[in-house]
Amino acid sequence: MIDLYTAATPNGFKISIALEEMGLDYQVHHLDLMANEQKQPEFLAINPNGRIPAIIDRDNDNFTVFESGAILIYLAEKTGKFYPEDPKRRSQVLQWLMFQMGGVGPMMGQANVFHRYFPEKIPAAIERYQNEGRRLFEVMNTQLATNQYLAGDEYTIADIATWPWVRIHEWSGVQIEGLKHLQRWVDELAERPACQKGIVTPPPSELSDEERAKQIQKMVTK
């Protein structure tokens, strides 16, 4: 059994998708980020950085893992799924996983902050992060022109990590028009049952976009 500590964010959805894809039994612990539950001592004992997601593997001496990329690698090694054994193929998967961890996630995250949440609109900052998000999308589009998935012709943890971010490109204000290969990939993954289940585990907020943006604004400006 895996205990999953998470919230309805792209980083959180990475792990719920992976657990669904891998067929692992898990229990969801939904943290209220607006109430700062991720900063409470009980959760800091699991993840000292106070960020979701994190897991506890009850079948492995209650072993804890935090950081979404590290969790994906741990689960893939545990199950032998979505992570090739061949060293070169494994490296290719890791390269695209790190591309998401160091590029797509941070850039789109900052686009969200300045485009949606920051009380003062700073055009230069908004443009900088949206443009970089689009550039990263173009890199993926080129890769997907000759590959079904990001790391080749096999669906891997690199796809699982990246899709939850790309699917919300409109919220970040990053355009996907003209990137037909990336759009094909987004649409194909959206048809996977595990992806469909993962992005509602835990359920997204029932607030309107405007209400959600105002709520998150309060958190990011504290």
Image (tube, helix red, strand yellow):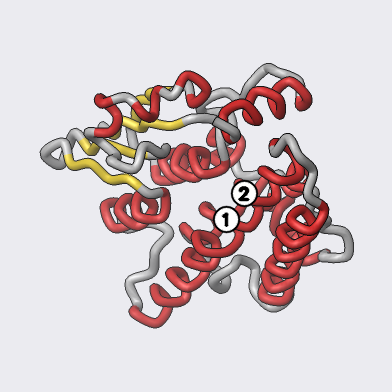
The structure residue drawn at horizontal position 79% and vertical position 58%, both measured from the top left corner, is 124
Question: Residue 182's image quarter?
Answer: bottom right
126 or 203: which is nearer to us?
Answer: 126
Dot 1 crowding, Cα within 10 Å, few <14, some 14–19, many 20+: some
For residue 70, the mark is none
The residue depicted at 28 percent of the width and 33 percent of the height is 44
Whether residue 38 sits left or right of residue 8 in the image: it is left
From the top left corner, tell me how far across and down residue 149 is, in percent: 61, 66
Q: Secondary structure at mark 2?
A: helix
The residue identified by callout 2 is 109
Residue 47 image-quadrant placement: top left
The three-letter amino acid code for the residue at tag 1 is: Pro
Tell me if residue 220 comes above or below residue 22 in the rendering.
above
- 79 relative to 217, above or below: below
Quarter of the image containing the C terminus?
A: top right
Measured as percent of width and height from the top left, residue 163 is found at 61, 52
> Are the residues at dot 1 and dot 2 in contact (C-beta closer than 8 Å)?
yes
Q: Quadrant of the N terminus?
A: top left
For numbered disc 1, what is the local secondary structure? helix
- Which residue is situated farthest in the bottom direction here? 88
Q: Position of residue 75 (x, y in %)?
A: 32, 50
Please give the residue where the numbered disc 1 appears in the rendered image. 106
User: Image point 29% across, 29% down: which residue?
Assistant: 43
Q: CA gap, disc 1 to disc 2?
A: 5 Å
Q: Type of residue at label 2?
A: Gly
